[in-house]
Image (spheres, grey):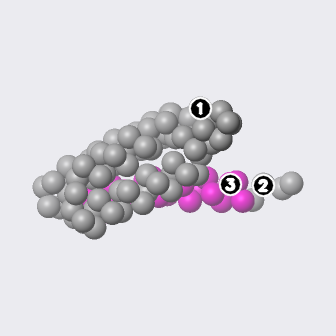
Amino acid sequence: MSNILVQTIFGWPAIILSIAVSIVGILKKWPWMLVVGGLVCAPFALYISGYPFFHKATLLLPFFQFGAAWAVHAKRMALAWVLLLPLVSVSIILAIIVLSQNG
């Protein structure tokens, strides 16, 4: 049971939920949803920052979502989309790494 909980909090469900909530927040113009997305992303960002390929810079991922929340609040939608790109980029890079592993 605890293994499933850890995978849910730190794994792909958290990543996908964070991105989905953030996209809905931008589309609906609800800044609070981006804050929720950042909070969901925080454990994943903390976990992945321990890997050498990603370094400590991944700790900033939730702050980009918080910045996107501010951008939505300030009605700067293009900036909100740009601030969501780091999380999406890291997620795509991680997916490529995971899918390219042998065995």
What residue is pinned by disc 3?
Answer: 97
17 lies above or below 10 = below
Badge 2 vs badge 1, beta-carbon distance below 8 Å: no
Q: How many marks?
A: 3
- Asked if the magenta segment contains residue 89, the reply would be yes
Residue 2: x, y in percent? Answer: 65, 33
Residue 6: x, y in percent? Answer: 61, 37
In the rendered view, does 72 fall on the left or right side of 84? left
Q: Residue at x 55, y 51 (%)?
A: 13
What residue is pinned by disc 2?
Answer: 101
Alpha carbon separation for disc pair 3 and 2: 7 Å
Q: Is residue 68 visible?
A: yes
Q: Which amino acid is tagged 1?
A: Gly
Residue 47: x, y in percent? Answer: 56, 35
Which numbered disc covers residue 76?
Answer: none
- Asked if the magenta segment contains residue 7, the reply would be no
Q: Which amino acid is tagged 3?
A: Ile
Badge 3 vs badge 2, beta-carbon distance below 8 Å: yes
